[in-house]
Image: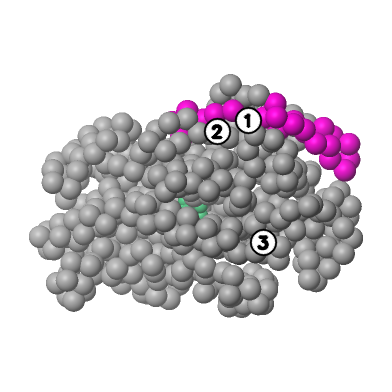
Amino acid sequence: MRILQVSSELFPLLKTGGLADVAGALPAALGAQACDVRPLLPGFPAVVAGLHAAQTIGNFTTPWGERIEVVLGHLPGLGAAGQALKAYVLLAPGLYDRPGNPYHDAQHHPYTDNHRRFAALGWGAAHLAYGLDSAWSPQLVHCHDWHAGLAPACMALWDSPHRVPSLFTIHNLAYQGCFDAGCFPELGLPASAFSVGGLEFYGQVSFMKAGLVYANHISTVSPTYAREIQTAEQGFGLDGLLRSRAAQLSGILNGVDGSVWDPKHDALLPHPFDMRKLTGKALNKAHLQAETDLEALPDAPLFTLVGRLTEQKGLPLVLGGIEEIVGGGGQLLVLGSGDAALEHALAGQAHAYPGRVAVRLDYDEALAHRIFGGSDVTLVPSRFEPCGLTQLYGMKYGSLPLVRRVGGLADTVTDTDLETLDDSSATGFVFDAFDSTPYRSALRRAFALYRRRADWNRVRHNGMRIASSWQDSARQYRDLYASLISTP
Ligand code: ADP
């Protein structure tokens, strides 16, 4: 099967969150399932720099008269079995050649021409679907998140002698790509598309809605999130539409890319380790405490959080639970950046509890690996969580996840109690309401288990054993692709 994968990020070229990890892992995982996956990416500087042997295969002109060149090159090491992966990139320096974050400027203001920048991604996908590359055409276009939302709309609404099915995957419904209605004429779509049954959303243009309305099938990154987004509480105004498409909506869990995240072969860890020999884990913890100015306390449980510092990720709970951690004799380390008020509050706590609380307000891929390698408990107390990857990385690196029972967290972590200890399914700590009382109670359960070392080791072992590779999920995507391609 020939699949065009459309996304705005792809690890290791460009990453702001979990979307990049998924886009970077899927082509190889699907390659092992006999799928020929080629990514399509905007030509951001890091993407252009990472593409080898690029050759022009065609071009197209935007409604405002800008010419966009489509090049085909390869990304070393990202294909099946570590081979090179063929990838398409859109060269449009006027749209993409900007330093830093792909979505906003240095002051965190979204670029005012984002509708143009990501409409171009949708057109690029539609042109490739309908024959721009005479040597390769996809049998299905797999679009990720709102940045690629215009692709299904163009593929459905443009005139074409043949149709190619599209799959639209939601990684986070909270980010929808909404723009002023005045930009609609620049999107190259028929006027009828700006309607309630199209991509109009409360008077604006919504790229997310375009994907949800026009794709042949919708998926999201966990079965629980697929159900949650059909409710008013988590539907962000799109729950009615999602309910109307329930028959074409499914959830497929993300996996862990073992070529990037494996404690046994992780070159970013000072002391690689595996489940049979955990001495490296203790050495990593000592190293991490030293490098982050935490006291050298080998027996203090080290709670860590790696992620965007937003309300979604449960930072208000984390801030409210610091006394519980410090009072219990534990330590807290946070790596992340985001909301200025949360950053400020966390920095204040690090100041108040030197040696016990440390905060790194940064984006640092290598430090993230060292944190999972040295951590005892990975905190993911999210308000909502489509899938979540850090709880999976935590488990694989012998750090027990402490999570809220929501979205993909509910699907991937099993709470520890006598029954789950006994049947070896326990992998972490799970609490229900988004409230400090159940969160703090989960923290106390973590302390209690930490004091029972044999049980702690058993739960840690359970998590490391599960591993969550991409294999099962890639099979589910392959089967979904096959059913969409064979449906007339
Ligand atoms: P989301 O996509 O909602 O941000 P996920 O848990 O799905 O959350 O994925 C987050 C990814 O980004 C993980 O690979 C995580 O390790 C990484 N990450 C998040 N913040 C940072 C940071 N400050 N430094 C390094 N890696 C980070």
Q: Main secondary structure of the magenta part?
A: strand
10 Å neighbourhood of mark 3: few (<14), some, or many (≥20)? many
Q: Which mark is residue 16?
A: none
10 Å neighbourhood of mark 1: few (<14), some, or many (≥20)? many
Q: Is residue 346 visible?
A: no
Question: Which range is magenta?
Answer: 56-78
Q: Secondary structure at mark 3?
A: loop
Quadrant housing the C terminus: bottom right
State the residue position of label 1.
72
Find out whether residue 198 is within the magenta segment.
no
State the residue position of label 3.
215
Query: Where's residue 238, x and y in %?
Result: 67, 71
Q: Which mark is residue 86?
A: 2
Question: In this image, 191 relative to 199: left or right?
Answer: right
Question: In this image, 95 relative to 443: left or right?
Answer: right
Q: Is mark 1 within 8 Å of ligand 1?
A: no
Query: Where's residue 386, x and y in %?
Result: 50, 62
* Image quadrant assignment for residue 180: bottom right
Find out whether residue 61 is within the magenta segment.
yes
Answer yes or no: do the residues labelled 1 and 2 have beta carbons within 8 Å? Answer: yes
